Amino acid sequence: MAGLLVYVHHDDGEFSPQGLGLLAKAAGLGGEVTAFVAGSGIDDGWAGSLGGHGAAKVLVADDAALGGLSQPIVDALAPTAAEADAVLFGAGVVSADVAAGLAARLGAGIACETTDIAMADGGVVATRPALDDTVMVESGFSGGPGIVLARANAFPVREGASGTAPVERVPVSVDDWSQRASLTGRETAEGGGVDITEADILVSVGRGMGGPENVQLVEALAKALGGEVAATRAVVDAGWVPYSMQVGQTGKTVSPKLYIACGVSGAIQHKVGMASAGTIIAINKDGNAPIFEFADVGVVGDALAILPKLTELVAARKG
């Protein structure tokens, strides 16, 4: 098959929004887009609903061995993927594993952390940020199917999706060695916390705060102001705070009345998530940080020294 092949992961009877968003993006590029679904006991009607998200056709690999681990899925996907122009994967643990395994199996190039996809000269061009999100890099593929792995939340799910696509079942052959590992259980992270998209005041932590031990300084200021804590992608990726706090292109879009950025460089991917804030205050010791170009108030200085004093002043004023 020629054209774009989109692997759509699913869990507990729900398609991953990462795969659905990528499917909609692929459909907007023109040409034929085929969705690929792997699993056990898949209903054709359910799989066909991917037509509402942009799939012209849905290929289903249904086998008891495709219970969630990545290697059997690579086995099932490889024959079809080898004939595609490019294979696209939404963000996710299993999707990333399958993408990497497929690239190794086919000897294909892979572009990770992709935030945009385009067609040029008949081939796929993947765009991704680099150098701590300060530059954007476009990557093409010289031969074979290009493998594209998207960054989380880079492509929105099509709203009001409706319609169906024809479903075709493909033969599945899984190697014995691919089944030597098995899934024995799962643990789900506890939810909770405040929705930062509804907060009037946000105090955001960036890598300029030095380390996770200094997040408490941001938390103290946010508490004194009656606000909430937000963060950049780099901070979330480093494990300082949960993903639910991330602001930016692949996080949440916020519009608080006040946004205080502490040690935040202001890369474009972060800016798009908070640029509509009423008042933006930036605290950064790097006077050339991009955030000063669009902040309403800029403070050039060490946030580690400024935040405790600012918190004391706010508390004293409120008292």
Image: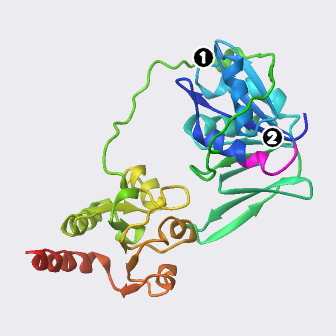
Residue at the (44%, 87%) spot, across then down: 287
Q: CA distance from mark 1 to mark 2?
A: 23 Å
Vertical comparison of 114 with 219: above or below: above
Q: Position of residue 28 (x, y in %)?
A: 78, 50
Residue at the (27%, 61%) spot, across then down: 213
Count all numbered tags in the image, as a single digit: 2
Left/right placement of residue 53 relative to residue 231 reads: right
Location of mark 1 (residue): 180
- What range is drawn magenta here? 25-31
Q: Quadrant of the N terminus?
A: top right
Q: Residue furthest left?
A: 319
Q: How is the image coloured?
A: rainbow
Left/right placement of residue 11 relative to residue 264 reads: right
Residue at the (61%, 53%) spot, across then down: 154
Q: Secondary structure at mark 1?
A: loop
Q: Which mark is residue 64?
A: none
Q: Quarter of the image holding residue 67?
A: top right
Sequence-wise, the earlier of marks 1 and 2 is 2
Q: Position of residue 52 (x, y in %)?
A: 71, 36
Q: Quarter of the image holding residue 210?
A: bottom left
Q: Position of residue 164 (x, y in %)?
A: 75, 29
Q: Position of residue 304 (x, y in %)?
A: 28, 75
Q: Which mark is residue 107?
A: 2
Q: Out of 154 and 303, give the one closest to the viewer.
A: 154
Q: Quadrant of the C terminus?
A: bottom left
Q: Out of 281 and 149, give the one closest to the viewer.
A: 281
